[in-house]
Image (cartoon, rainbow, N blue to C red):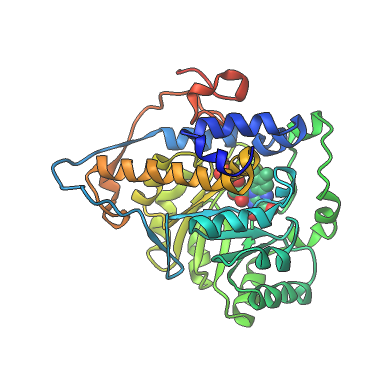
Amino acid sequence: MSGPAATQFLTLHEIVVAARANLAPGPWGYLIGGTETETTVRRNRLALDSIAFRPRVLRDVSAVDSTATFLGRAVRLPVILAPVGGMESFVAEGAAAAARAAAQFGIPQMLSSVCHPGLEATAAAADTLRVFQLYVRGDEAWVDDWARRARAHGFSAFCFTVDSAFYSRRERDLIGRYVKPWRADAAAGVKYQAALSWDQVKRFKDRHDLPVILKGIATAEDAEIAVRHGVEVIYVSNHGGRQLDHGLGSAAVLPEIVAAAGGHAEVWVDGGFMRGSDVVKAIALGARCVGLGRLACLGLAAAGVAGLVRALELMEEEIRTCLGLLGVTTLAELTPAHVAAAPPVFEPAALSAFPLLGEDLGATRPA
Ligand SMILES: Cc1cc2nc3c(=O)[nH]c(=O)nc-3n(C[C@H](O)[C@H](O)[C@H](O)COP(=O)(O)O)c2cc1C
């Protein structure tokens, strides 16, 4: 589909359908799948679907503002494009297309170290707010070199993904014999990632003055240790259910981590966020920013840069509608009193946020 036609998408559902039509089974399974039984994938959705809203009324919501700040800079929504390795499996220009969409729409991008066209070319592709995510595949000098390059190319923070000591068993990929083109590079030096410890976090903080993000924190205990190390951002994530199976849903652990951070570090979150209302729930529970992984890739696969921009426009419309109907005019007014625990209505699945899709695309019927 050419760029302008992307404006014809009136719902996020249609974007998912277009992405499915454009992707071969291998990349589709790689994108949608998770680890082993995919219980963590489902729990991400279950956790979000187990939160209901408590709306307030008669509060003049004629002007709603859904803008936010990201590491002190103004952004259009409280969301970031989560780091995705092998994005070139979904759109030919890979991370460069994501950078252009982020710049065009006005949100930040987090670039994965295992994504083409690489750090320098992605930075050159668009002038956008960007942060860098590293999988550690070398010694301290190797890490320092990435930090130097990131700083030199305008990345404003440095992220270590800490939920990936081992690469997990993604059974959709294994059964489909899908060989990810970039895995050979990514697999070299994995022992360095497995050996990571808090000592390396301390060393990095002592040596570099880039803000540090730890992505993959899933307990209050680790959030407390992160705060003690002066980490600027605690990024609650289970890698979209693609690493440890049988974890809790991200939205379920968010409150304990916000409490543990105690305002000393920003808390970001991802895992199953597909709708504007999902983002609003996270902000109400104390997150500052929400990462979009699969949704961003679905937008790119549907119609390239224009497809992702359209997905973000639709999400923005959903967020603004949700805020107005909750009786607030800014994200800052959201509090935990705007949400409550509730039984989920849908059986959770990777795409259960789109119940009109039909079961063949991974949506499920009401329970
Ligand atoms: C295809 C794909 C590749 C990913 N690659 C990376 C990566 O290179 N680094 C990383 O930290 N997380 C990676 N993730 C995890 C995402 O950053 C994010 O945590 C996750 O996708 C959030 O869940 P969601 O897809 O349900 O939004 C990847 C996710 C997907 C779907």
How far from the left and from the top, in percent, is residue 319?
37, 44
Q: Is residue 107 visible?
A: yes
Considering only vertical position in the picture, is 220 above or below 231?
Answer: above
The answer to which of 121 and 306 lies nearer the viewer is 306
How far from the left and from the top, in percent, is residue 326?
25, 42
The answer to which of 296 and 342 lies nearer the viewer is 296
Left or right of 233: which side holds 191?
right
Q: Is residue 281 visible?
A: no
Q: Quadrant of the C terminus?
A: top left
How far from the left and from the top, in percent, is residue 18?
61, 31
Considering only vertical position in the picture, is 295 above or below 116?
Answer: above
The answer to which of 173 and 115 lies nearer the viewer is 115
Numbered disc total: 0
Q: Quadrant of the N terminus?
A: top right
How far from the left and from the top, in percent, is residue 365?
49, 17
- The structure residue drawn at horizontal position 67% and vertical position 71%, both measured from the top left corner, is 200
Considering only vertical position in the picture, is 104 above or below 119?
Answer: above
